[in-house]
Each structure stands twice: as C-alpha cells, then as structure tokens.
Amino acid sequence: MAAIITLDRRTVGGEEVQTVEARKLHKFLQVEARFNDWIVRRIEEYGFEEGKDFCYSKLSSKPGSRGGHNRKDYHLTLDMAKELSMVERTDKGREARRYFIECERIALGRAVEQEDSDDELSTVKDRLPLYHGAVDIVVTYRLSFGKAYQALNWFAGVDGFPKMTKRQAREVSGFMGRFLSGDATQRDFERIETNRAALKGESPQLNLIGVTIPLIHGQKPHR
C-alpha cells in the first residue's frame, strides 16, 4: 500500500496510537480555507476533544518569522482523520478515508501477530538491554550485579533472565528505565515484593528498594 500521508505515533489520552499531522491532511485534501481556520472550525463543528481525538505539539519557528512561537500542529487519531476526510465530500476525502481504514487494518494485524509472539521465550537479543541496564544500576547506585540481576528477575516473576518471555523482557526494560531516571513507582516495588514472595526469595529491600524509596518521593538517592 502506497503511503499517501505519513503517519506517526503519539500519546493521546494516555495511550500511544497512530496519528496524522493535521497540516499534512489539510494539504492532501486540498482544502481552500486557511489551515488554522479549517481545523478550529471542524473541531467546534464536530465536538472533537483534546486528549481524546487529538493532541498538540509546538512547531519550531523559522528564523526571522513573526509569531512563529505560537504556531502549533494537531496530531489527529485515525478516527478523527477519517471523519474530517469524509465531511469534505471530495474524491480526495474519500481516498484519504479508505487509506486510514487500510492503515488501521494493517496495524491490527500486526498487533495480533505481536500478541501471539509475546508469550514466546525471549531471545538473547531481547534480553541484551537488561544486562546493560543491570550494569547501569550497579554503576549508578553501587549495588552488586547479583542484587540488581535478582531484583529485575523478580519484577518479571522468574528466577533467571533466560526464563523471561518477550513480554516480560519488555516490561522489565520499562521498569529499569523508570528506576534509572528516578520515575519508578511504589507499584513497581510492590510487584517485585509480590513476585519475590511467590518465588520465596531473599528480600530485594536489602539494597535496591532501600536506594529507591527516596526517589519515589522526589528526593535524591543516598549514595
């Protein structure tokens, strides 16, 4: 399928979804009205909501331009893009709508394939970021590699990296990123403790959680 309008991925309403830049859609539909007039009018006419149907992003201004700091673009969900295309009642509008429907169909197929493979055993390639992350934890918080390795396994609910599924490896990678950036949550550590108890392991509070509790409250870790 030829990409007549490039798509992106943005977080809308707390969920990462496929989106369309409104300016690109406006250009493809060959709308005569100015972009700002068109998009604002359509939002008002059809009751589209920020955070549900679209999100904003600031556009960088060109050197020497006036008022560029106020420019913004709208990133539309495919449902909103389909509706905007349909209401134009033109050949271009119908073409765009069919294109977005096909994009959704392809994305759904890929999601099903991904879901089917999520429970497959992870590969060395899947787990490689976890080893690097464990080393980062050791260097940043001066923990032993064994403690970091153990806590990451408990987050997944297994007793060794090779036993993780592809889904678990991704989830651990996400936790590791939050931990290193100071954004780990209490729920993250409750999950570690719950899985530790289920596996009857030694408490990870010996080091990892003791270092991280201050981060949860927005404080600097004790080195």
Image (cartoon, rainbow, N blue to C red):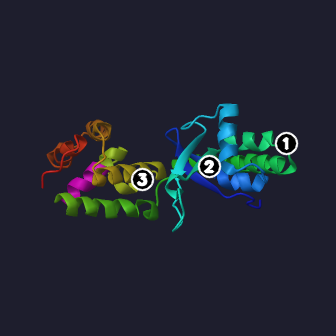
- Closer mark to the observer between disc 2 and disc 3: 2
**Separation of residues labelled 2 and 3 (CA atoms):** 27 Å
- Label 1 environment density (alpha carbons within 10 Å; few <14, some 14–19, many ≥20): few
Q: Is residue 113 above or below residue 124?
A: above
Q: Of residues 173 and 179, which is closer to you in this image?
A: 179
Query: Is residue 149 a member of the stretch shown in magenta?
Result: yes
Q: Which tag, 3 or 1, sits closer to the chain's start?
A: 1
Disc number at residue 19? 2
Pick the quarter of the image with the C terminus: bottom left
- Residue 6 image point, x, y percent: 67, 58
- The dot on residue 156 is none
Q: Is residue 110 shown to the viewer in this render?
A: no
Question: At label 3, which amino acid type do we have?
Answer: Ala
Q: What stretch is highlighted in magenta?
A: 143-152
Q: Is residue 98 left or right of residue 194?
A: right
Dot 1 falls on a residue whose secondary structure is loop
Furthest residue toward left: 223
Number of numbered discs: 3
**Residue at left 21%, top 64%?**
139
Q: Main secondary structure of the magenta part?
A: helix
Q: Distance between the residues labelled 1 and 2?
A: 22 Å
Q: Which disc is residue 169 wearing?
A: 3
Query: Is tag 2's residue or tag 3's residue first in the polypeptide sequence?
Result: 2
* First of labels 1, 2 by sequence position: 2
Residue drawn where x is 68% and y is 38% of the image? 41
Relative placement, left or right, of 95 versus 100 is right
Disc sitting over residue 89 in the figure: 1
